[in-house]
């Protein structure tokens, strides 16, 4: 009975204008990818840039996933300020804290899909961004 009442109430609402970002839904495209290695025991951090088709740099964002030993995800983060992320990575590289190198998007896609869709339970910190991360990984070659 609750769903019927909710549907009836929703039908009674005046039509809302379309959101300005509605046309961009489903039109995400992959950009550059990087491999960041902080040390032999720290695993790899894969960073993939994404944009919305036809939107230039508007809405540019990145997926950053830290993979521990055996490519097990230990951290999944969606980054809104990609230039700041890469500036920080370059500064860390100049301080010899890590190595940053371009990485093949096909290789990144395969590694992320395997890691994010594996049978192992993920750390709790991964779950807030997991659905978006899985979608973005599916866009990669």
Image (cartoon, helix red, strand yellow):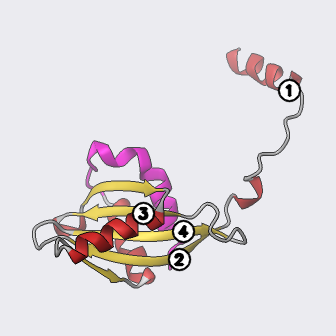
For marks 3 and 2, the one nearer the N-term is 2
Q: Are marks 3 and 4 in contact (CB under 8 Å)?
A: no
* Quadrant of the image occupied by residue 88: bottom left
| Mark closer to the observer (4, 1) | 4
Q: Nearer the viewer, mark 1 or mark 3?
A: 3
Q: Earlier in the sequence, mark 1 or mark 3?
A: 1
> Does the magenta stretch mainly form a helix, a strand or a loop?
helix
Of the image marks 4 and 2, the number of the one nearer the N terminus: 2
Q: Residue 3 in the image: x percent, y percent?
A: 70, 21
Name above or below for residue 19 compared with residue 112.
above
Circle 3 residues within 10 Å: few <14, some 14–19, many ≥20: few
The answer to which image quadrant residue 5 occupies is top right
Residue under label 3, please give it. 84
Q: Name the secondary structure under disc 1.
A: helix
Evaluate if marks 4 and 2 touch, with contact meaning CB atoms under 8 Å apart: yes
Q: Which residue is mark 1?
A: 11
Residue at 37%, 83% (x, y): give it. Answer: 103
User: Dot 1, crowdedness within 10 Å: few (<14), some or many (≥20)?
Assistant: few
Picture layout, residue 93 above or below residue 18: below
Distance (Cα) linking label 4 and label 1: 36 Å
What residue does disc 4 label?
A: 50
Count neighbours of disc 2 (C-alpha within 10 A) and say few if under 14, some if 14 to 19, many if 20 or more: some
């Amino acid at each position: 009975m609750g769903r019927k009442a909710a549907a009836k109430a929703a039908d009674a609402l005046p039509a809302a204008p379309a959101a300005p970002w509605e046309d961009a839904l489903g039109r995400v495209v992959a950009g550059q990818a990087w491999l960041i290695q902080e040390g032999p025991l720290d695993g790899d951090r894969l960073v993939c840039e994404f944009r919305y088709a036809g939107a230039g740099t508007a809405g540019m964002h990145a997926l950053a996933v830290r993979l521990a030993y055996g490519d097990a995800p230990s951290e999944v983060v969606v980054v809104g300020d990609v230039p700041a992320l890469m500036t920080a990575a370059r500064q860390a590289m100049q301080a010899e804290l890590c190595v940053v190198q371009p990485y093949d998007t096909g290789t990144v896609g395969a590694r992320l899909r395997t890691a994010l869709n594996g049978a192992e339970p993920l750390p709790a910190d991964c779950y807030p961004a997991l659905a978006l991360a899985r979608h973005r990984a599916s866009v990669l070659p």
